[in-house]
Image (cartoon, rainbow, N blue to C red):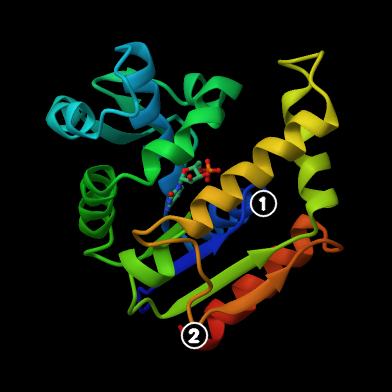
Amino acid sequence: MKKIIITIDGYSSCGKSTLARQLASRLDYVFIDSGAMYRAITLYFLEHKTDIKDEKAISDALDQIRLEFINNGTPGQSDIHLNGDNVEKAIRTLKVSNHVSDIAALEAVRHFAVSQQQAMGEKKGIVMDGRDIGTTVFPKAELKIFMTASIEVRTHRRYDELKAKYPDISLEEVKDNLLKRDLIDSTRKISPLRQAKDAITLDNSKLSMPQQLDIAAGWAEEIL
Ligand code: C5P
């Protein structure tokens, strides 16, 4: 079967990674969560107490960071490893969420991540989700999906994910973080979050997971 590149971009907590993972599994493709890379880079700088406003210090230290996606035992699923350590859980904290968009806006950081993402797509057969995948990382991808959902739906989804770990968290706090990240992501100078001209919109506010998967897989099958 022909192998293509599928990109899924959109605002925070639209369910991009969930759909990307399931679509990759249905097509027997590789799934890459590009946000996990920016989160792991952020974790590195938080752990090393680097001043995240010091762009030169960040840029100089990037060659100390080794990122790998390693299979986690479930076929087609991988966890991100930072310098040999599995950080899949450690990158999902509020602290990382609160700083990641500032780090991801830096030119050196984007260059570092994008070049690795492009190398991962060389053999095609990949579904990658993020913010700039259809515009910057794979502008020639065969299928580009842009996911949207209302801010209320996105806030509740993220709140449900976080409340087990952070029982005191409020809906307001979750919504503020989503809106703040969306604003930084869509107004930054380098590869801001934008819908690629040739991307198809998928508004999943009222769709179940199986419905979204059927729609996206249908689009892929039209090309394959
Ligand atoms: O996808 P996720 O919400 O985990 O991504 C975390 C952050 O990483 C985003 O808010 C954004 O700032 C950054 N990101 C990015 N470009 C991507 C993927 C994520 O700037 N392709």
Q: Say which residue appears at 62% left-offset and 49% top-offset.
A: 12
Q: Is residue 47 above or below residue 204?
A: above
Residue receiving disc 2: 198
Q: Is residue 189 above or below residue 97?
A: below
| Residue 79, image x, y percentages | 42, 32
Dot 1 amino acid type: Gly
Q: Say which residue appears at 45% left-offset and 83% top-offset.
A: 224
Residue receiving disc 1: 15
Real-space CA distance between mark 2 and mark 1, rounded to the nearest whole angstrom? 20 Å
Left or right: residue 2 versus residue 181 is left
Earlier sequence position, callout 2 versus callout 1 = 1
Q: Which image quadrant for residue 215?
A: bottom right
| Residue 148, image x, y percentages | 69, 64
Circle 1: is it few (<14), some (14-19), or many (20+) Cα within 10 Å?
A: many
Dot 2 amino acid type: Asp
Q: Secondary structure at mark 2?
A: loop
Q: Which image quadrant for residue 49?
A: top left
